[in-house]
Image (spheres, rainbow, N blue to C red):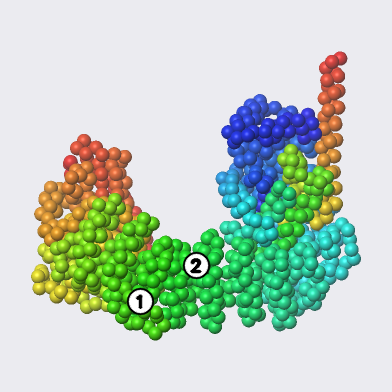
Amino acid sequence: MNPFSSGTCLRDMIRAIRACKTSAEERAVVRKECAAIRASINEDDQDYRHRNLAKLMFIQMLGYPTHFGQMECLKLIASAGFPEKRIGYLGLMLLLDERQEVLMLVTNSLKQDLNHSNQYIVGLALCALGNICSAEMARDLAPEVERLLQFRDPNIRKKAALCSIRIIKKVPALAENFINCAASLLKEKHHGVLITGVQLCADLCKVSSEALEYFRKKCTEGLVRTLRDIVNSPYSPEYDISGITDPYLHIRLLKLLRILGQGDADASDRMTDILAQVATKTESNKNAGNAILYECVETIMSIEDDGGLRVLAINILGKFLSNRDNNIRYVALNMLMRATTLDAQAVQRHRATILDCVKDSDASIRKRALDLLYLLVNDNNVKPLIKELIEYLEVSDQEFKGDLTAKICSLVEKFSSEKIWYIDQMLKVLSEAGNFVKDEVWHALIVVISNASDLHGYTVRALYRAFLTSTEQETLVRVAVWCIGEYGDMLVNNVGMLDIEDPITVTECDAVDAVEVAIKRHTSDLTTKAMALIALLKLSSRFPSYSERIKDIIVQNKGNVVLELQQRSIEFNRILQKHPKFRSALVERMPVLDEATFSGRRAGSLPTAISTSSGAPSNLPNGIAKPATAPIPDLLDLSSDDVPAPSSSGGDFLQDLLGVDLSPTPAPSGADMPPKASTDVLLDLLSIGMPLPVQTGLSASDILSSSQDDKAPFVNFNGLASLSSLSANATSPANAAPMMDLLDGRGPGPQKSEENGQAYPSLVAYESSSLRVMFNFSKQRGSPQTTLIQATFTNLSSNVYNDFLFQAAVPKFLQLHLDPASSNTLPASGDGSITQNLKVTNSQHGKKSLVMRVRIAYKTNNKDVLEERQINNFPQNL
Amino acid sequence: MIHFVLLISRQGKVRLTKWYSAYSQKERTKVIRELSGLILTRGPKLCNFVEWRGLRVVYKRYASLYFCMCIDEDDNELEILEIIHHYVEVLDRYFGSVCELDLIYNFHKAYFILDELLIAGELQEPSKRTVARLVAAQDSLVETAKEQTSSITNIIAQAANV
């Protein structure tokens, strides 16, 4: 019995599913049905096979898994009758996609059906093949399809043509087999065959230049004639759509002509007449006519033409743009976008209309128009356009603000010839849509502000005003807080007043109030709060009379649950309390930030900060050129023994960071430090990587702890920019503690590391003729399970090793953490070494000793070398 | 080319899906969810195009059903609107003023008609009459096969009774 003619059972299921009131009920019904279908499949029940499959298709459409029905499709396809095959092929197309292995099993059935005597069965097979065939199937069945392109029934020929499109897309190498047959399809009279044939030719041209040449030479003339015939054809009810005979054919012919005309003046020349005719004679009051005009405009703009036709095309687009139908306006904007590269002047004429479209109520149109307007902005029109856009920003939809803000910021930056204009526009954007401004944009703004020394006073006052009116814009608050911290004195004393400014009186108290507001607003995130803390520290020295109040605010954060803020406020509190003589020097104004370096970093081409021999100040991350004077440890009153070895990467990083050349001269241990240098260095520590001054204190603490207990966490400079990586560091109390020790001025226990050094002898973990690996062990206080291993790699051969990579694996009872290596290049003949830190946690401490498998890969003389070994001779009790 | 065709009801129920590009089962569910969120929320009188993942979705609402087709950026959106309308007209002619219930209970027929209209994401036949004729011819093949089976079943049943 046939389910689709009697139908009751499929119908009953659909009815039952539709009657369900909740999705739980629906799931229950579907589960029951699926169970019944599975049972029936297991019994290999032939009578109900197609009914089961039909049900499965419906179930699949509801989003339930139906993979168990896939084999049923194959069985139905393999059966003899048309009804079974029809439903089988439908199931195949719905339940499977081309990436499933099962599909390969159907190739044979497809081949038989493509040669079937019943043309409808051939049609089913072609349809399935065209919709889901994979590359393998395409290769296997291409000859059959090729043959069917000449089949007597046109309905099979058209299906074969579309099937060929799929085949050549999957296997472009097969294209040349189809060129001749495709060309003969272009002479057909049957519209179905003709449009599929034209489409096939277009796709052939895309994958094969040989086909393109062939059609260009042999078929251009004929295609132009076909287009002329169809344009001038009398009314034919079968193909008529709103007064036009077969617009689909029009469109496909225009598309193919475009491909043939592109880059070929001769072919283009032959089609100009008919294009002009289509462009002028097509009725534009119905969608079908507009679709043809749209295609025609695109063809005119793509082919080689002297410009006469282009004027026609741009005029059509102008008419489209003023159309009341949103669809037409949308495609006009879309096409004008492509026209900007051809004739920007002509598009500029429609600027006002395009600007109106940016303010349209339709999101799709707004987006198109904004993209287009972005291309139209130039030096002459940027100011009025930006003014309009910013005004619109105030009233635009929330979801559009992100896009709009990004575009405005990008334009303002691109055309920022005057700094004051740039700063003004950015302030407007920050106050209107600060929450949509990306980090790099406000970082760039701060760099520009820092460089515009004559505008510092103006900027900080403008920001202060903006801050008072809108505190809900996160980035505005950040920039304002940063500027108040830096230029607080200018705010209060009205330094650098410009003529255009309204006078404003701000007291020291007001300035501190503003920062306090920023730190206390509950919407402020970690970055803002941390920036506010730094601003307070800076203000404490700018406004000494408010020092006590500032200390109170800072102290309030001592118990903050966010470790970063807690640590910061404790540190700053210490600075305020115990080091008043350092303070003013510590919080001096930031040096001017280097724009070139910043933009370089934004472009992702940050010069790698960790390079061993760079003493060049120009490469400094924050671009401060300073004579090399003193190594950092002296500043913090550490003994000079703790100077990190020049080869250790922690040291290198620090060295780069500070622009100090450590390697040749160990500095005199030092009380006789010039105070100026100490200021600069500490200042750098506190606000390096300027845009996020917050995070640098932290990195400094990392570095300090590294120099202290020989455990150098390698801070990747790029990592500095991302808060997450830093807060990850911040959660390790081991790193935070030493920093506080340092600020307390206590001696940071070098004894400890000595103890560790004695407790566990170093181990030559691995030695071959070419390479030696040394392990030094140390323990963290309070966690006997964890061993810190510093691995030192030495090259014993006379060739340099490149792409050096050390990998290690441990059994399950151990946990291994690998820090990045200090370098990936190992100089020859023991002339230097790579170090890398490992942290191993032994969950069976005391019962089992460490064991590790290591693998070392490197390149020498352009040859890859791989060395592997198991290390069992770790000291006991690790 | 058309990457997929979706029919979604105003309540977000899927009535037909046809995929001409490879999307895994998981991606399909995701695509449908994303697009119904995008399309069903759009007000009337807005344009019929939505930009989505670097592609464009052309949709048109007929009564309670949204017909959606996803195309490449450089395809002709206005033509796709015509193709959607073409499909609706063929359905209308086949079912005799089609409604959503027809498409629910006879979803397979909606697929059969679509298969006569589109293959490999390209238009196959511009003539509604030809499509209707081809579908009718195949339907009658099914009818004939069914009659034969039932008559054979009858013969067997009679033979068994004798």
| Residue ID at (30%, 41%) | A811
Q: Picture quarter containing residue A96?
A: top right
Q: Pointer 2 and pointer 1: residues touching (CB < 8 Å)?
A: no
The residue that disc 2 covers is: A405
Examine the rendered structure and indicate whether residue A247 appears above or below residue A224: above
In this rendering, position of residue A800 left or right of residue B46: left
SS of the residue under disc 2: helix
Can see residue A628? yes
The amino acid type of the residue labelled 1 equals Ile
Q: Picture quarter containing residue B75?
A: bottom right
The residue that disc 1 covers is: A504
| Badge 1 density bin: few <14, some 14–19, many ≥20, Cα 10 Å | some
Q: Nearer the viewer, residue A237 or A352?
A: A352
Disc 2 to disc 1, C-alpha distance = 29 Å
Q: Position of residue A541 (x, y in %)?
A: 22, 70
| Residue ID at (31%, 73%) | A506
